[in-house]
């Protein structure tokens, strides 16, 4: 009996060893939670607008650079135009608006010149000649001679004393070495030959001046229509 049982057991073992195994049972897969895509889906799914991520900034960059270049070019042109306009503006070139020292110097010298050029003493007529030689140049030489012609002619006979005092002056402009000054003055005219009769008056004129070295000379005299 024991021999027969051992034989049967051995046959069963041999049969089990030679029998092919069936396919393994598939593993149970847990379904994903609601609303959470699987890893593979997240990696392959495109964005909602259908374009690859990062393409929009790269596509807009050349457009932005072109717009920036246009703006910079426009600003450069505007800046150049304004700079040229400022250089050409007479108010900008007028040093009288900014150069206080030169303006003060000009007013002082023009005041001295006008008082000397329009004052006369019959006892010393050469003083008027010296004033003309010191303070006049250009067209002003002839203009001054015409304006003082009657004084020179009648002065010795009437024993004339003419005194001019500048009361106020204003620099209209200074452009480099040229300038224009408005002058207001009081004048007294005494004729000692006729019992010292004295008359008074006011004068206003515009003076063109030019600077040579450190001195301003009168180059033109405008009486502003007083003699017309």
Image (cartoon, grey):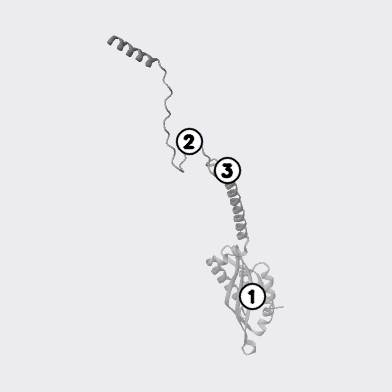
- Relative to 43, residue 160 above or below: below
54 above or below 201?
above
Would you identify the image quadrant in which residue 49 lies?
Answer: top right
Say whether disc 1 or disc 3 marks the residue closer to the N-terminus.
Answer: 3
Q: Which residue is labeled 2 in the image?
A: 40
Position in image of residue 80 (x %, y %)? 61, 55
Q: Is residue 70 visible?
A: yes
Quadrant assignment for the C terminus: bottom right
When the figure is inspected, residue 109 is found, relative to residue 80, above or below; the finding is below
Of pointers 1 and 2, the one earlier in the residue sequence: 2
Image coords of residue 51 (percent x, y): 56, 41
Extreme residue in the left direction: 2
Instruction: Kindly indicate whether the residue at mark 3 contacts the one at mark 2 (C-beta within 8 angstroms).
Output: no
Task: Label 1: state its secondary structure.
Answer: strand
The image's mark for residue 59 is 3
Q: Residues within 10 Å of mark 3 (few under 14, many from 20)?
A: few
The crowding category of the residue bearing disc 2, from other C-alpha atoms within 10 Å (few below 14, some 14 to 19, many at least 20), is: few
Depth check: give the residue in front, 38 or 87: 38
Q: Earlier in the sequence, mark 2 or mark 3?
A: 2
At 66% from the left and 81% from the top, the residue drawn is: 155
Residue 205 image label = 1
Judging depth in this view, the residue of 3 and 160 nearest the camera is 3
Q: Disc 2 and disc 3: Cα gap in Å? A: 28 Å
Position of the N terminus by quadrant: top left
Rendered residue at 48%/36% (across/down): 40
């Amino acid at each position: 009996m024991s021999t027969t049982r051992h034989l049967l057991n051995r046959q069963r073992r041999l049969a089990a060893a030679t029998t092919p195994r069936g396919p393994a049972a598939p593993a149970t897969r847990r379904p994903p939670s609601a609303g959470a895509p699987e890893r593979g889906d997240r990696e392959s799914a495109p964005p909602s607008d259908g374009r690859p991520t990062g393409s929009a900034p790269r596509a807009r960059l050349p457009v932005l650079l072109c717009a920036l270049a246009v703006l910079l070019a426009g600003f450069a042109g505007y800046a150049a135009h304004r700079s040229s306009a400022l250089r050409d503006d007479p108010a900008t070139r007028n040093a009288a608006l900014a150069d206080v020292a030169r303006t003060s110097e000009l007013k002082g010298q023009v005041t001295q010149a006008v008082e000397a050029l329009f004052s006369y003493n019959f006892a010393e007529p050469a003083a008027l000649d010296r004033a003309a030689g010191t303070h006049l140049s250009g067209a002003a030489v002839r203009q001054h001679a015409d304006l003082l012609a009657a004084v020179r002619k009648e002065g010795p006979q009437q024993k004339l004393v003419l005194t001019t005092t500048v009361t106020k002056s204003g620099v209209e402009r200074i452009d480099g070495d040229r300038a224009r000054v408005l002058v207001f003055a009081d004048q007294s005219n005494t004729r000692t030959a006729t019992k010292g009769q004295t008359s008074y008056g006011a004068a206003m004129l515009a003076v063109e001046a030019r600077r040579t070295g450190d001195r301003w000379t009168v180059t033109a005299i405008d009486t502003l229509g007083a003699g017309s």
